[in-house]
């Protein structure tokens, strides 16, 4: 029997594990997508401080973690008010990452579902997620009911990185998803 995933609000003392998941996810997912210099500048100390500040600043950004009893924190998400309201969505998932060793355990889906629930409780009605266009997570977002709604090009350490926005007009995941 597979171990269950539990979602909860992140606490300040989770910042180190949130940073670990974030860094490991970036190092697993983004080589060849973002500049290698960016990956090299991500340090546990710097990311821990960044995530501790985000966790402490609940008014601007909410942070949830996914835990498994035997493994500890295996995923994280952060969300809040949409940064670009011109797209017509009021909420936004800023980050959603799962430890590469725990892909396929249901943590991503559970995090997205919980983030949507939290956004609804905060009065939001819709959501957008920006993803690097070459990131395979784009297929996860599509299976969860997100529809490509916009594209842009971001600059990261001098390189251009294409991004795609996925939108949900209602805060609900796809009912017939094949992702477990």
Image (cartoon, rainbow, N blue to C red):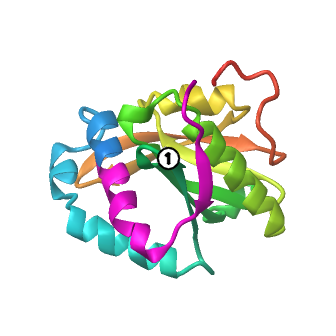
* Relative vertical location of residue 109 with respect to residue 64 in this rendering, above or below: above
Residue 32, image quadrant: top left
Image location of residue 152, percent across then percent down: 50, 45
Residue 21 lies in the magenta stretch: yes
Residue 23 left/right relative to 76: left
What residue lies at 63% left-to-right and 25% top-to-bottom? 180
Q: Which residue is mark 1?
A: 69
Span of residues in magenta = 1-23
* Relative vertical location of residue 8 with respect to residue 75 in this rendering, above or below: below
What residue lies at 17% left-to-right and 43% top-to-bottom? 36
Q: In the rendered image, is residue 149 in sight? A: yes
* Relative vertical location of residue 46 with respect to residue 131 in this rendering, above or below: below
* Relative vertical location of residue 128 with respect to residue 121 in this rendering, above or below: above
Residue 160 left/right relative to 51: left
Image location of residue 14, percent across then percent down: 42, 67
- The quadrant of the image that shows the N terminus is top right
Image location of residue 150, percent across then percent down: 62, 41
């Amino acid at each position: 029997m597979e171990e269950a995933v539990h979602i909860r609000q992140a606490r300040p003392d989770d910042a180190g594990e949130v940073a670990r998941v974030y860094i490991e996810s970036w190092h697993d997912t983004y080589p060849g997508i973002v500049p290698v210099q960016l990956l090299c500048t991500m340090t546990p100390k710097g990311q821990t401080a960044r995530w501790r500040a985000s966790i402490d600043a609940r008014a601007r950004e909410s942070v949830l973690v996914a835990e498994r009893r035997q493994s500890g924190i295996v995923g994280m998400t952060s969300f809040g008010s949409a940064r670009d309201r011109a797209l017509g969505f009021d909420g936004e998932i800023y980050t959603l990452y799962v430890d590469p060793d725990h892909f396929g355990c249901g943590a991503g889906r559970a995090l997205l579902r919980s983030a949507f629930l939290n956004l609804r409780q905060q009065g939001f009605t819709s959501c957008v997620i920006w993803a690097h266009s070459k990131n395979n997570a784009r297929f996860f977002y599509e299976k969860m009911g997100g529809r490509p709604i916009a594209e842009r090009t971001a600059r990261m350490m001098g390189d251009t990185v294409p991004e795609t926005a996925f939108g949900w007009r209602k805060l609900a995941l796809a009912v017939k998803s094949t992702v477990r």
